Image (cartoon, rainbow, N blue to C red):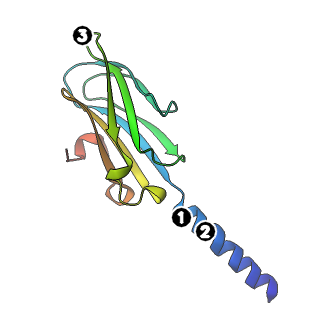
Amino acid sequence: MIFVTIYALAFAVVSGCAATEPNYDVSFYNSGKTQLTEVRCLNVPELSAGVLIPGSWKNDSDCRFPVPEEMTMAWNGADGVYRERKLAVRQLIEQPGSFRGTILIRFTQDGPTVIPVPKERKYETPPAVSGS
């Protein structure tokens, strides 16, 4: 009986910890009309997309590090000009400490924006995501 109680308590503690750990994807989507190169996140080096042709997307799966306060995105436009933009991320997510879903970095002609997509709103491809 004591063993069962200890096992149940251990399972509850482990399950509770697992449920609060962030586990999300980061997707990069080029909804613009020109190719982007050297697309990357400067302050989270694990995240990069390389080349994004118009209409393409790339995904980094199973990010288990905390959702960053912001991401500094860098890329080269079709004109070869290097660009950089800081994007607020953490403040856009309701419960960043336990976020499960996708952080979509959507590139338009005006630059990148962040669209958090909780797991319950999972999408097939980024164009299905509406939002700013």
Identify the residue under disc 1: 19
Residue 123 seen in the figure: no
Q: Quadrant of residue 51?
A: top left
The residue positioned farthest toward the bottom in the image shown: 1
| Badge 2 density bin: few <14, some 14–19, many ≥20, Cα 10 Å | few
The reply to whether dot 2 and dot 1 touch (C-beta < 8 Å) is yes
Earlier sequence position, callout 1 versus callout 3 = 1
Q: Which percent across, then down, holds residue 64?
A: 54, 48
The vertical placement of 94 against 34, above or below, is below
Q: Amino acid at mark 2?
A: Ser
Q: Alpha carbon of mark 3 to alpha carbon of mark 2: how far?
A: 50 Å
Q: Residue at x 35, y 54 (%)?
A: 93
Say which amino acid is labelled 3.
Asp
Amino acid under label 1? Ala
User: Closer to the camera, 72 or 32?
Assistant: 72
Could you tell whether 106 is left or right of 9 in the image?
left
Q: Residue tagged by mark 2?
A: 15
Circles 3 and 2 in contact, beta carbons < 8 Å: no
